[in-house]
Image: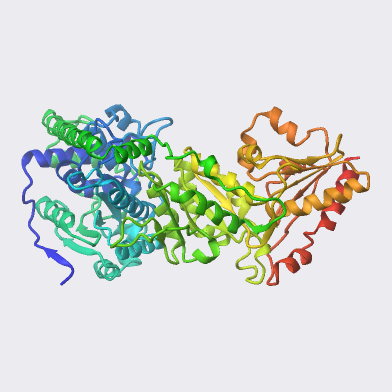
Amino acid sequence: MSTQQLQDNPFPGVTALDNQCIQTIRFLAMEGVQAANSGHPGMPMGCAPAAYTLFNKTMKHNPANSSWINRDRFVLSAGHGSMLLYSMLHLCGYDLSLEDLKQFRQWGSKTPGHPEYGFTDGVELTTGPLGQGISSAVGMAIASKYAGAYFNRDGYDVIDYNIQVISGDGCLQEGISSEASSLAGHLGLDNLIVTYDDNHITIDGDTDLSFTEDVAKRYESYGWYVQIVGGDGNDMSAYEKALENAKNEKNRPSIIQLRTHIGYGSPNKQDSHDAHGAALGEDEINLIKENANWPKEKFHVPVEVKEEFNQVKEKGAKLEAQWNEMFANYKTAHPDLAQAFEDAQSGKFPVDIESILPTFEAGEKLATRQASGKVLNAIMPQLPLIMGGSADLTPSNNTHFAGAEDYQKDSTSGRYIRYGVREHAMGAILNGINISGLLRAYAATFFCFADYMRPAIRLAALSHYPTPFVFTHDSIGLGEDGPTHQPVEHMPAYRAIPNLNLFRPADANETAYAWKHMLENTKGPSIIVLTRQGLPNLDQEKYGAAKEGVAKGGYVLISDENPSVQIIATGSEIELALNAYESLSAEGIACRVISLPCFSLFESQDKAYRDAVILPNVKARCGVEAGISQGWDKYIGDSGEFVGMTGFGASAPGPEAYKGFGITTEAVIEAAKKSLANAS
C-alpha cells in the first residue's frame, strides 16, 4: 500500500518542556492577532506542534545567518497563519523581537499580515495567495537538485538542502497546486516535504461544504509518498517519524496528511471557522490560559522555553560551521567549482553578457521570438547556472538552446524544464528557482496565457524576485489563431504592475539588449514580449543605438530638425512609424520617431533625459501599438492620436488583421496629421 497509516497515540514523546514550548507558540500567535485585532489565530494554534518539531528537531538552519546557502527552506504556504512563522522565528533567535510580534500587522513593522520575502529575517518566500507557496516550493526543490548536481562532488555535498512546507486545505484546492504537485511527482523531487494541515475548516465552514476528495489518493496518483498522521496534531512522535521517513524516501516528493484542529485549546472556537480569520477575543484567550494554567501576562515566554530555543541557535551555528569547514576543503579540492559557487552567490556571471551577445545585420527580417532564440543560443552555453524552459510550446517560443538537456527525475543536471501545459505552476516554480541564491531561470508561453501566471508575476514584482518571464505571439500579428490567442489588453495590464519591467523590442538588436537587462536586473522581475511575424532589423548607424536606448527604456530612432510631430511606437509597429516618417518628411512635415521598448525603465530616467527624447513642447504626437490605448495618454497627451486596437482581434492572416483593424502606415500618417491639427 502506497499510503502509510501511522498509529494514533495521544501525546507520545511530548515532554513537559516540549508542551511548554508549544503552548508558548500558541499564545504568542493568538496574542499577536489579538493585539492587531486582525489576523488568523486558529491555524497557528493547531499547527504549533508541527512547527515546533520542524524548527527544533528536523530542519537544518542557523537563526544567526538566515542566508546560509545550504539551509533547509521552510515555506508557510498557508501564509494567513503568519503568526505561527513569526513566533517560531522569534523564539529560534532570528532577527525578530518580541516587540515586533506585538506590532503584528502595523505600519512599518517586520510582521506584516502575510509573510513577505526580503522583509522579515527568516522568511523564505512571500505567501498568502493560496497555492503560490507550495508551487514555488517546487521550484526551490528543483534549484536544490540542479545546484547539487552541478556543484557536488564525492565527499562534498555542498548543496543538499530540503524544502519543508506547511500547506492547508485552501492551498490544495487552488488549481495551481495541482499543476505544481503533478510536475513535482513527475520529476521525483524527494527533497520536497509537504505537511498538509488537515484541519477540516475553511472560511465558509467545514470542508465538507466543498472539499471532499481523498487528498491522499490524489497525491498517490501524482507519484508522491503519502503518509497519514491521525489524532489531533499533538502526536509529535508519529509526526517526527513521518518526517524522517520522508527524508529517507528516494525519487518521490512527500506529503504528510496531519490531522489537526483549528483553534486547538479554545473551549468555544476550536474546530470552528470562527477561529480562522478573526481575533479570538480577550475573554476567550483568558479562558484558554486558565485551562492551560498559563500566566495572564501577555506575550509571556518562560525562561525554560528561551533556554530550549537557544539550543536551536547553537545547533544551527555548529551545522553551518561544519559546512564551512567542508567548503574550505572543497575549495582546495575543486577550486574552479568553488570560485563559480562564490561568484554565483554574489550574483556575478562567469562572463560579461554584453561580450557574448550576438549582433544582427540591418535589413534582415526576423521575428523577435527567433531573435530571442539566437540570443539564447549564443549566451546560454556560457551561463551554466541559468535554467530554461517552456510550457509545452518550445518549438513556437524558441526557448531551447544549443546543447540543452532536459531536467528530469533521472537527469537533474539537465537545465531545460518541460513544464507541460501548466502555466499557473510555471510562474510560481520560476520564482522558487530565482530566489535560490545560486540560480536563475526563465520559461515561456504565449502572451495571451500570461493571465494564467499573473498572480505569480505580481508576487515576483511585490517581492523583488529577479524572474525573467518570456512571452511570444504578442499581438494580432500572430494571425489565424484568432482573438482567443491574440493579446490586446495584456501590455497595459502588465505595465500597470509596480516594479515590473515589460520589454516589447522592435527588432533583433533591441531583443538582445532586453535579454541583457533582464538577466542583469536583480531588483525585480522582467517580461519580454516577442513577435511571431518577421520584423526588419534596424540599421544601428542610421537610427538610435539599441544598446543605450533599451537600457533607458526609450530613445530617439530618427528625427528631423525642429520636429512638429512625434511618433512614439513599440515592437512591430516601429516599422509602421518609420515608414510614416519617410512619407511625412517627404511632404515637408518635420517628424521624430521614438522607440519605447520599456515604459517603466523610461519613466525611471531623470526628467532631462525623458524631455530630450519626447520633446515636451511638441504637442502633436501619435502613439502606435497593436494593443489597446490604456497607458498611452501620458505620452501622447490631449492633442495626441493613437493607432491601435479598440477591441478584440480576429481570425485572419496577420497582415490582413493589421489592415482590417486600421493599423497601417497610412493610418499612422493620418493620425500624425490629425494630431498636428489638434495641437494647432
Q: Nearer the viewer, residue 457 or 130?
A: 457
Name the residue rendered at 85%, 52% in the picture.
669
Residue 377 in sight from this viewpoint: yes
Picture quadrant where residue 27 is located: top left
Using the image, determine if residue 101 lies above or below residue 171. Answer: above
Quadrant the C terminus occupies: top right
Residue 232 in sight from this viewpoint: no
Q: Nearer the viewer, residue 167 or 523?
A: 523
Using the image, determine if residue 552 lies above or below residue 228. Answer: above
**Residue 539 placed where, x, y %?**
72, 47
**Residue 513 placed where, x, y %?**
59, 44
Left or right of 347, for residue 320: left
Q: Nearer the viewer, residue 201 or 152?
A: 152
**Residue 601 placed where, x, y %?**
61, 38
Q: Nearer the viewer, residue 680 or 486?
A: 486
Left or right of 551, for residue 376: left
Name the residue rendered at 64%, 50% in the picture.
360
**Residue 657 placed where, x, y %?**
73, 67
Left or right of 75, for residue 257: left
Left or right of 596, for residue 297: left
Picture quadrant where residue 56 is located: top left
**Label total for image:** 0
Name the residue rendered at 39%, 60% in the picture.
405
Quadrant the N terminus occupies: bottom left
Picture quadrant where residue 169 is located: bottom left
Using the image, determine if residue 124 lies above or below residue 607. Answer: below
| Residue furthest right as drawn | 587
